[in-house]
Image (cartoon, rainbow, N blue to C red):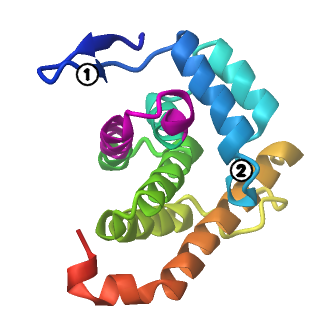
Amino acid sequence: MTIQLMRNSSGNDAIVQLGFDQITRAMVDAFFEEVYPCSVFGFLRKNPFYESFENGYVSRGLLLSLCSLSVKYVLPKHEEQSRRWSAEAKSHAHRDIESGQVTASTLGSLILCFHQELFNRIFGAAWMTSGVAIRLAFALRFNLTPNTAPPGTLPMAWADGESRRRMMWAVYAMDIVLQCTKIFFTNPTSMR
């Protein structure tokens, strides 16, 4: 996978494909420098994420959603690309859900997509994404304490349990944001 810049009909560069190259690395770096300091993104652990990224183990949906938040810091005139990547990440998440292959990466991707939509004032889409993410968090049982392993199984590693806990807090924060901004979701003219 690579990012390719191509000229579109208006003469502007258009990004057509996302991948593991220097621009993608710059977007991942920008995410951790510019976006990540917001504590709601604490479920992503920086060093393990970089290790997975370097080895090609980051899910495409998670990478697309992460880059959709950071593209404005690397390629400022590509806001529309941010929306396309977020939409593609959500499409990957929905395929995971339909196939029963949901993971923490699926939920993380939806959380990042929610924030991309919220930051870009796409309130209707953010509202719908939040509903899916909240239900998925409960389906993955992230609302339960990870310290109690069923009999005959190994307990979860502390770092994994902490990531799950932080992800649940991120989902809770999404719900709080929606409660605080309900005027946008109850006024049909404000939804796009």
**Which mark's residue is nearer the viewer, 2 or 1?**
1
Residues under numbered marks 2 and 1 in contact, where contact means CB atoms less than 8 Å apart: no
Which residue is most to the right?
Answer: 158
Q: Secondary structure at mark 1?
A: loop
Against 87, residue 173 (above or below) is below
Residue at image position (81%, 29%) is 47
Against 124, residue 79 (above or below) is above
Q: Position of residue 128 (x, y in %)?
A: 33, 68
Task: Name the residue beneath numbered marker 2.
Answer: 43
Report if residue 153 is visible in the image. no
Q: Secondary structure at mark 2?
A: loop
Residue at image position (40%, 70%) is 131
User: Residue 102, labelled with which disc?
Assistant: none
The amino acid marked with disc number 2 is Phe
Q: Position of residue 171 (x, y in %)?
A: 59, 67
Q: Earlier in the sequence, mark 2 or mark 1?
A: 1
Q: Which residues are magenta?
A: 70-92
**Depth check, front residue: 122 or 142:** 122
Residue at image position (36%, 82%) is 184
Q: Position of residue 10 (x, y in %)?
A: 15, 24
Task: Tell me: 81 left or right of 192.
Answer: right
Residue at image position (30%, 43%) is 91
**Depth check, front residue: 6 or 46:** 6
Where residue 6 sits, quadrant-wise, is top left
> How far is the residue under mark 2 from the one under mark 1?
36 Å
**Depth check, front residue: 72 or 97:** 72
Task: Name the residue beneath numbered marker 1.
Answer: 12
